[in-house]
Amino acid sequence: MNTDLLRILPETILVVAGILVMLIDASLPPRAQRRGLIWVAAPGTMLALWASLIQLRLDPGTAFFGAVETSPFTIFFHVLICGIVLVALLLAYDTLPRDSHHQGEFYALVLFGASGMCLLTGAVELLVVFIALEISSISTYILAGYRKHTGKGPEAAIKYFLLGSFATGFLLYGIALIFGATGSTQIYEVAHKAASAQNHTFIVLALMLMLVGILFKVSAAPFHVWTPDVYEGAPSPVVALLSTAPKAAAFALLLRVLYQMLPDLRSLWMPLLWVIAAASMTIGNLAALRQQNVKRMLAYSSIAHAGYLLAAFAGLADKGIAAAAFYIAAYAAMNVGIFAVVTLISGYDEHLPLVADFRGVLYRSPLLGSLLIFFLISLIGIPFTGGFFGKFYSFSAAVGGGAVVLAIIGLLNSGVAAAYYVRLAVTVAQKPENGMSQAALPVPQIGVAVGAALLFTVGATLWLGIAPEPILRAAENAAHALQ
C-alpha cells in the first residue's frame, strides 16, 4: 500500500465506515429500525484503532507534500479518540430510542466527526488544520441538536454553531496572518521562519487569534460560555463524546502550535496560559457549586478540568507535553464513564435532571450508584484513580516549570471541587425520602453494549490510577516526537 495512504489510514477507514452507514441507511425501508447499523460503525471504529496501532511500524514522517504527519504523538491521540468514539457508540446503542429513524445519521455523524478529530491531530499544514476542525465541528454542531423534539436541543445546536463559527473565524484569520508574515502555512516551515520574520507583530497577533479559536474548543475561560447550555441541551451520549474527543483533538492542536510551531514565543504564551488556567479552574469550580442540574454541574466541572490540564503547559517542554497528554487520557476515561452513568439514571429524555433527583440511586441500582460515586472520586483526584495521577503529573509539571503559585491555585480549586462532587455522592447514597416510593422510581436497565462501555471506562480509570506507567511512557514518547 502507498505510504501516504498508510499515514491517513485511520481517517480513511472512519470515512468509509461513515459512507457505508449512510448508504445502508438510505436503502432501508422508512419504518425499519436503524439500530443494527452499529455493526458497521463500531467495527469501523475498531478497525481505525487497529490501523492507528499499525502506524507504529512506520517511521515518523509526513505525507501528501508535508500536509499530515505520522509520529508517536499523532498515534497516541488517534488511539485515544478512536477509543472514546467506540465507547460513545456502545453507549448510544443502548440509550437512544429504539424507534428512532435517525440512528443511521447519528452513527455517520460520529464517524465523520471522528475522522476530522484524527486528521486534526496529525495535520502539520494549517489549511488542513482548518479543514479538519470544520469536519469535526460541523458533525458535533448537528449532534448537539439531536433531540430536536425538545426546545433545549435546537437551542444548544444554534448556540454552539454561532459561537463556534465565530471562534473558527479567529483561527482562520490567525492562519492568514501567519501566511502573511512567513509566506507559508506548513507548521515546520513556519517554525523555521517565524524567528526571522520581518513583521514580528503579525506573528504575535496570529498567535493570539489562533489561541481564541483553540481555547474555545476546549472550553477554557473566558471562552466557556457555550458549555453549560450545550451540555444541558444535547443528549447525554453526545455530551460524553463532545466533552472528551473534540477536546483531545483541540489540545493536541494546541500542543503542536505552542511547542512545535511557535516555541520561541514561550515567554509570551506561557504567562497568558497561566492566567487562563487559573481563571478556568476558579470560574468553573465556583460556578459548579451553585448548580442544581447535574449536567450543568459537570459542564462547569469540565471547564475547571481544562484549567487543570492547561497548568501542565507551564512546565518544561517534555514534562509539560507528557503531563498534558496523560491528563487528557485520564479525563476522557472518567468523564465518558460518568456521563454513561448519568445517561442510564436520567434516561434519554432526562426525566431526572437535578441533583436532588439522584437521591437513593444507590438503593435503586447499587451498581450504577457505586459507579457514579467511583467516577466522582476520580474527578476529585483521590489516589488509585486516573484523576489522581492526572492532577499529580499536571501540577508537578507546573512546579517543575516554576509555576508554583499556579499549582497551589490548582490544589485549592481541587478542594473547592470536592464540595460539589461530594454533595452529589452523598445524595446518591442517601435513602429515599419517606414519601418517596422506590417502586415508583424507574430502575435503570444496563444493556450489554452500555455494560461493555462502563466496563471499559472503569477499567481504564483504574488502570491509569494503579499502573499508569505504560500510558505515561506513551505520553512521553509523544512528547519527544513533538519537539
Image (tube, rainbow, N blue to C red):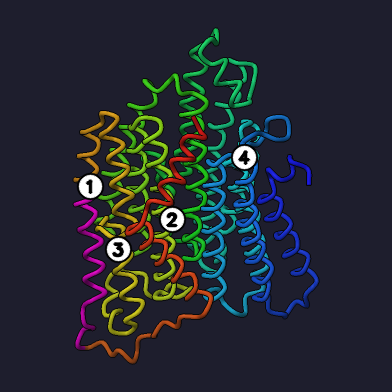
Q: Can residue 68 be seen in this view?
A: yes
Nearest the viewer among 63 and 212 is 63
Was residue 433 drawn as part of the magenta stretch in this picture? yes
What's the residue at 39%, 67% (across, down)?
A: 458
Q: Of the residues under marks 2 and 4, which one precedes in the sequence?
A: 4
What's the residue at 46%, 46% (across, down)?
A: 474
Count numbered badges in the picture: 4
The answer to whether 365 is drawn above or below residue 156 in the figure is: below
Q: Of the residues under marks 1 and 2, which one precedes in the sequence?
A: 2
Determine which residue is flagged by label 3. 376
Front label number (2 vs 4): 4
What's the residue at 62%, 57% (across, down)?
A: 50
Determine which residue is flagged by label 1. 413
Mark 1 lies on a secondary structure that is: helix
Badge 4 amino acid = Thr
Residue 70 is marked as 4
Residue 276 in which image quadrant: top left
Determine which residue is flagged by label 2. 332
Badge 2 amino acid = Ala
Mark 2 lies on a secondary structure that is: helix
Instruction: Indicate the position of residue 221 as horizontal and vertical percent values.
Output: 36, 40
Q: How far apart are marks 4 and 1 (CA)?
A: 37 Å
Nearest the viewer among 198 and 463 is 463
Instruction: Indicate the position of residue 436 as horizontal and vertical percent values.
Output: 26, 87
Instruction: Indicate the position of residue 85 as horizontal and vertical percent values.
Output: 55, 59
